[in-house]
Amino acid sequence: MKFERYGAGIARGMVVTLKHLFRRPVTTQYPEERLTVSRRIRGNELIWDRERCTGCATCAKSCPQGAIRIVTSPGEENDYIVEEFRVDSGYCIFCGLCVESCPYEALFMGYIYERARYRRRELVLSKEELLTSEKKQPSGYARPKVEAALPPQTLLLDRDGVKE
């Protein structure tokens, strides 16, 4: 029996505890102070680009939940006019398959992760609510060109640029 190792596990555990005891607390005051999330976040928002969308409905076909509904009509030069583009974000699992399958890069995942609603019908987003605007920030999920222009992620331990 080796008595020299008796209590070594407790001593290692106490070293870790003491090391963290004198560290500055890592706390974010959430509503006032927000961290920059990952560039490739799959937030619970979809952003749609009307100019790039051709109405091919590949995104709706790839959705495992059937949360995307597209109604198109024939256009003038062998293309489609998108009359209705609707996403039921209550059923959407935000897997990103619709963004990955879009051949024209007309659909993006967004940065927003605060979309709680009191009524289920408020979770159905029409094409006007999905359009790109100044306040909507597309994430770099499945879009490397967009990812290069986004700010780096703010980590809890690397907030000031110095790791503790």
Image (cartoon, helix red, strand yellow):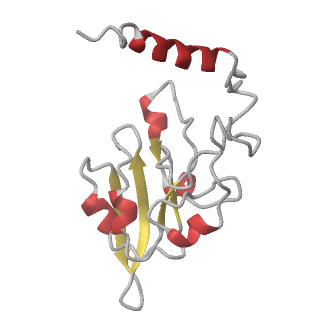
Q: Is residue 110 above or below residue 56?
A: above
In the image: residue 161, left or right of residue 12: right
Q: Is 116 in front, or is 10?
A: 10
In the displayed structure, 22 sits above or below 134; it is above
Report the residue at 44% width, 64% height from top: 142
68 displayed left or right of 137 = left
The residue sitting at 50% across, 45% down in the picture is 43
Q: In the image, 29: left or right of 124?
A: right
Q: Is residue 135 left or right of residue 117?
A: right
Residue 66, horizontal then vertical, whole percent: 26, 50
- Residue at image x 52%, y 30%? 116
Residue 114 place in picture, x, y as percent? 57, 35
- Residue at coordinates 69% horizontally, 21% vertically from top-left? 23
Q: State the residue in front, 94 or 90.
A: 94
Instruction: Please state the horizontal and vertical placement of residue 1, each as a whole percent of the image.
Output: 22, 9
> In terms of depth relative to the viewer, which is nearer, 117 or 96?
96
Q: Position of residue 26 (x, y in %)?
A: 67, 25
Q: Quadrant of residue 54?
A: bottom left
